Image (tube, rainbow, N blue to C red):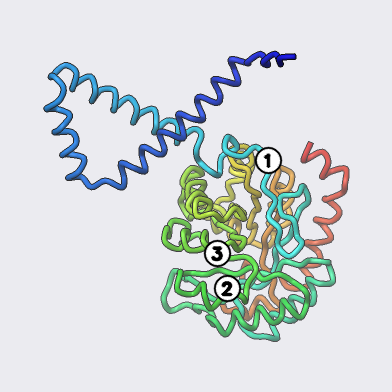
Amino acid sequence: MKAVPAERNPKDELVNINHELAFLLRKRSELLDAQSAEECKRRMKEAASIFDGDTYDALQALLKDIEKMQSNTIKTHSLLYSRKSQRKQTVVDVNGNLIGDGNCHFIMGPCSVESVEQVNQTASEMKKRGLQLLRGGAFKPRTSPYDFQGLGMEGLRSLSKTARDHQMAVVTEIMSPSQLEEAYDLLDVIQIGARNMQNFELLKAVGRTGKPVLLKRGLAATIKEFMLAAEYILREGNNHVILCERGIRTFGTETRNTLDISSVPILKQETHLPVIVDVAHSTGRKDLFIPAAKAAVAIGADGVMAEVHPNPVSALSDAGQQMNHQEFHDFMDAMEHFLTPKTLAAIHQ
């Protein structure tokens, strides 16, 4: 018996046609980019000789409409960070820590790696609270060239050894593509600092590594610019991107920066990437860490980053925004009390 063909759904066919059109338009764009300006000019000259004036003008108008349609298609559908590109939430696996899984993750450690002892002491305190994500700066881009610039690769080796000894993951900033090869095996998450958010060659380089990347928002970057910076990493094939809101520069002077707390739900709605909040750089005041962290989690953040130092008074960088070990435990007590299963369920409902 002959099978009866299934009834076609016009809506599904239209979606398929739209996908095919978008693919063809992207393909056309790639081919155009591959051609030199001289070749394009020659082809248009040939077209002018083949068609009469009215037909040629109509052809040009059609090409302009196609270019406009292509531009709109890319803006609304093709951006890899967009929920239109991927509905499912991305979960970034950092040595078993699933960032974006609905739980709150903490990334802690000193602003700068100053010595093996200093990092070891802080890692030991973190371990008591079950934390597994150790941050620390080996390369320190500073506003003044006379400020402490970090211990470089030596500091990263110390940080890495300490983390391995404590079964922790290393989160550290890399400042240039040339550092990646040597640093690759010493770290678990590549941090892109605020000042490097639009260092496009660096973004492309880390996109080719496949390592998880923690991308910080620039000092005065719009949310759109922030998302497009992530796009540079994603389009190189690296989907393991974590966005970090770390405050933006405004006219306010009461805090180091202004924590743009509203960026968290915007990023969560516009992208499928996990979002964390750095309460240290956004406020610059450790007396604000707890309320800022609670606000971040309450509004939907997937994690919190803060700085801890055995003796902040003697710290070589950002002394005022680093908690000592007792303050760290007080912070964790407050957050653990706040992060009850009931609270988390309500936040992620």
Residue 168, picture quadrant:
bottom right
Residue at 59 percent of width and 82 percent of height: 155
Residue at 40 percent of width and 33 percent of height: 25
Which percent across, then down, holds residue 244? 60, 54
Labels 1 & 3 near each other (Cβ < 8 A): no
Dot 1 falls on a residue whose secondary structure is loop
Residues packed near mark 3 inside 10 Å, few (<14), some (14 to 19) or many (20 plus): some
Instruction: Quote the CA–CA distance across marks 1 and 3.
Output: 23 Å
Residue 120 to residue 289: above or below = below
Q: Of callouts 3 and 2, which one flags the residue occurring earlier in the amino acid sequence?
A: 2
Indicate the amino acid at tag 1.
Lys
Which percent across, then down, holds residue 207? 52, 59
Residue at 48 percent of width and 47 percent of height: 228
Residues packed near mark 1 inside 10 Å, few (<14), some (14 to 19) or many (20 plus): few
Q: Of callouts 1 and 2, which one flags the residue occurring earlier in the amino acid sequence?
A: 1
Labels 3 & 2 near each other (Cβ < 8 A): yes
For mark 1, what is the residue? 88
Which percent across, then down, holds residue 270? 58, 38
Q: Of callouts 1 and 3, which one flags the residue occurring earlier in the amino acid sequence?
A: 1
Indicate the amino acid at tag 2.
Tyr
For mark 2, what is the residue? 184
Q: Closest to the observer: 216 or 290?
A: 216
Residue 315 located left or right of residue 181: right
Residue 209's label in the rendered image is: 3
Dot 2 falls on a residue whose secondary structure is helix
Quarter occupied by the C terminus: top right
Residue 282 to residue 176: above or below = above
